[in-house]
Amino acid sequence: MNINNAIEVLDRMRLPNGAYTASISKDYHFVWIRDVVYTVLPFLQSQSDRYEKAYHALFELFKTYEWKIDIHREKKPVYLFEYIHSRYSTDLKEMSQEWGHAQNDAIGAFLWGVGVGVSHGQKVIRDEKDLAIVQKLVDYLECLQYWQAKDNGMWEENMELHASSVGACVAGLRAVKMLVNVKNELIQKGEETLRFLLPRESETKETDLSLLSLIYPYRIVERKTALKIVEMVSESLERTNGCIRYQNDQYYNEGSEAEWCFGLPWLGLCYFEMGMHDKAYEYVNKTVRIVPDNWEVPELYIGGKNVPNGNTPLAWSVSLSYLFLNRMINMPSSQLTGND
């Protein structure tokens, strides 16, 4: 398996404006803020300009809708279309279609990516106008009272208070507090919510694949909670071709829940983050099994059918698979014992 094929696949999904389409399929030929954040993680520490160009594209997107951010720094959104959207056309325009637009995690993810990018020497911030957008997004989360705000969550579904959304916002606010003004209490309120909610994802979901984000890439939970999250996800949600997002998920469910391919490398990355290298290594073969030679990793395997859906390749799947396998390949073999 040539791991560098992953980068070629991602480059095919890279748009002239620097952002990435979630997939080249008809259904997913759109730009999701969250997907872009995860898609460019392989380039965070590279010399290429892919990371910063992707964020420059997202900054341009936010500038187009700056008037909307300005309104909702002062006044909470009421209707879904009033929220800052998380999905756009490939030329970075809002879609008119009804959607679960209230996705606070996407805003948190963007802020996190900006802060982490700057700390890794990426020229993500170009000028004062970019910094002003960062400040306005912080103000937007404050106006929303994100720590107690119901949203559609990472999977764009029913409105409830999601630990993964609150956690993304906490991570984002922490990451940009050196760049703009972030009140300490704004972060503390989110942390209090997480202490109350975790290890649950929400009132209706005991566990959820999205909780892995709090371990990787955000690293915002303590070890005891992280262990509980990976234990619950691997025991309840892990399957052969990936992980289900949560129990009774109806998306692409044709007899059972769909198996999302990126769940396997994501679990591996989480174990790696926790220093549990032997456990992480168990996910190498599991991940290799779902990565085809051409590196066009699918979104998911249709539940009950054991075949990939049409959203192949999914940028996010390719990115997490590459990140995990690349990390494991480059790890000294001496680290593969006694780390559990």
Image (spheres, rainbow, N blue to C red):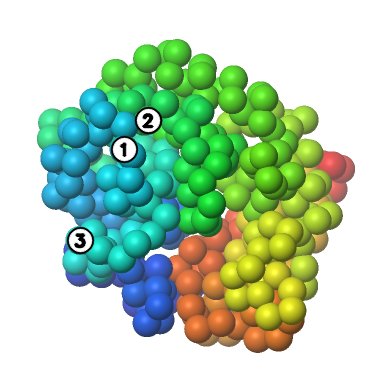
First in residue order: circle 3 vs circle 1: 1
Q: Position of residue 163 (x, y in %)?
A: 59, 37
Residue under numbered circle 2: 144
Numbered marks: total: 3
Where disc 3 sits, the SS reads loop
Residue under numbered circle 3: 93
Please state, as top left, top right, bottom left or bottom right, where the N terminus lies in the image: bottom right
Where is 299 relative to 96, above or below?
A: below
Around disc 3, counting alpha carbons within 10 Å, would you say few (fewer than 14), some (14 to 19), or many (20 or more)? Answer: some
Q: In the image shown, does 150 or 330 lie closer to the viewer?
A: 150
Q: In the image shown, does 158 or 231 lie closer to the viewer?
A: 158
Q: Going 67% across and 25% down the picture, which residue do you hit?
A: 196
Q: Going 22% across and 37% down the picture, which residue do you hit?
A: 69
Q: Callout 2, which amino acid?
A: Leu
Q: Going 75% across and 52% down the picture, which residue do you hit?
A: 233
Residue under numbered circle 1: 77
Where disc 2 sits, the SS reads helix
Marks 3/2: CA distance? Answer: 23 Å
User: Is residue 40 rendered to the left or right of residue 282?
Assistant: left
Report if the CB atoms under discs 2 and 1 are less than 8 Å apart.
yes
Around disc 1, counting alpha carbons within 10 Å, would you say few (fewer than 14), some (14 to 19), or many (20 or more)? Answer: some
Q: Position of residue 132 (x, y in %)?
A: 18, 30
Q: Callout 3, which amino acid?
A: Lys
Where disc 1 sits, the SS reads loop
Q: Callout 1, which amino acid?
A: Pro
Q: Position of residue 26 (x, y in %)?
A: 37, 82
